[in-house]
Each structure stands twice: as C-alpha cells, then as structure tokens.
Amino acid sequence: MNAGIYFSLYIVLVDPDNNARIFFIPQELQTREMFQPREPLGPNAKRAGWQGFNIVCSKALGAPIPLCLNGENVFRLEYK
C-alpha cells in the first residue's frame, strides 16, 4: 500500500442466510485513502504483529462494480 501499487480486488459479501454478492474494484479506482491500517495482531496470534487493512469503498474513485451470475447479482452459497 505504501508504494501505491494496487491490484484489482474482488470483494465477497455474505449475509447470515448465506446469500452472497461479489463486487469488483479495478486498480484504477483505488486510492491510498481506501486502505485504513488495522491494529496489529496480538502476541498470541499465529502471525503475531501482522497488520492488515480495512477497505473503505467510499474512498474509491468510483463505485464497486457488482458482478452477476446468470443475470443475478445475489446468489446463495451452499457448503458440502
């Protein structure tokens, strides 16, 4: 993130009923402000000290693009 090199993102949102939506954010729409650092993982975590980012889509240069499956942008996840 610090270098300003971004990769296109696919974001999957799943509700409590296992209904999912997939959104695409191309690298051209991403900004440094979109990525807010999280607190580093605690000392007892498997990857202690690792620090990720929260993605704030409202800080992108455009809206995330919803991806469709068979014409629908909501689909049900089924686990086997």
Image (cartoon, grey):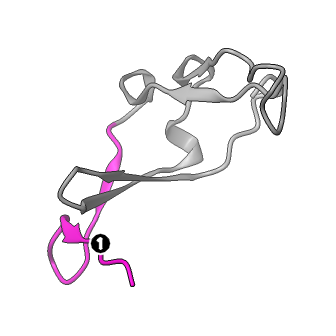
Counting from the top left corner in percent of width and height, residue 78 is at: 30, 78
- Occupied quadrant, residue 31: top right
Q: Which residue is under mark 1? A: 77
Q: Is residue 57 left or right of residue 67?
A: right
- Is residue 66 covered in magenta? yes
- Is residue 67 covered in magenta? yes
Q: Is residue 29 left or right of residue 27?
A: left
> Quick one: quadrant of the C terminus?
bottom left
Picture residue at 69% right of the left edge, 29% below the top? 52
Is 22 placed above or below 13 here? below
Is 40 placed above or below 13 here? above
Neighbor class of circle 1 (other Cα within 10 Å; few <14, some 14-19, many 20+) is few
Please tell me which residue lies in front, 13 or 70: 13
Q: Is residue 44 left or right of residue 18?
A: right
For the record, the magenta segment spans: 63-80
Counting from the top left corner in percent of width and height, residue 20 is at: 27, 61
Picture residue at 84% right of the left edge, 22% below the top? 49
> Quick one: quadrant of the N terminus?
top right
Picture residue at 84% right of the left edge, 28% below the top? 48
Counting from the top left corner in percent of width and height, residue 42 is at: 76, 19
Residue at disc 1, secondary structure: loop
- Occupied quadrant, residue 44: top right
The secondary structure that dominates the magenta segment is loop
Task: Report the number of numbered marks.
Answer: 1
- Amino acid type, label 1: Leu
Residue farthest along the front direction in this orientation? 44
Counting from the top left corner in percent of width and height, residue 28 is at: 56, 42
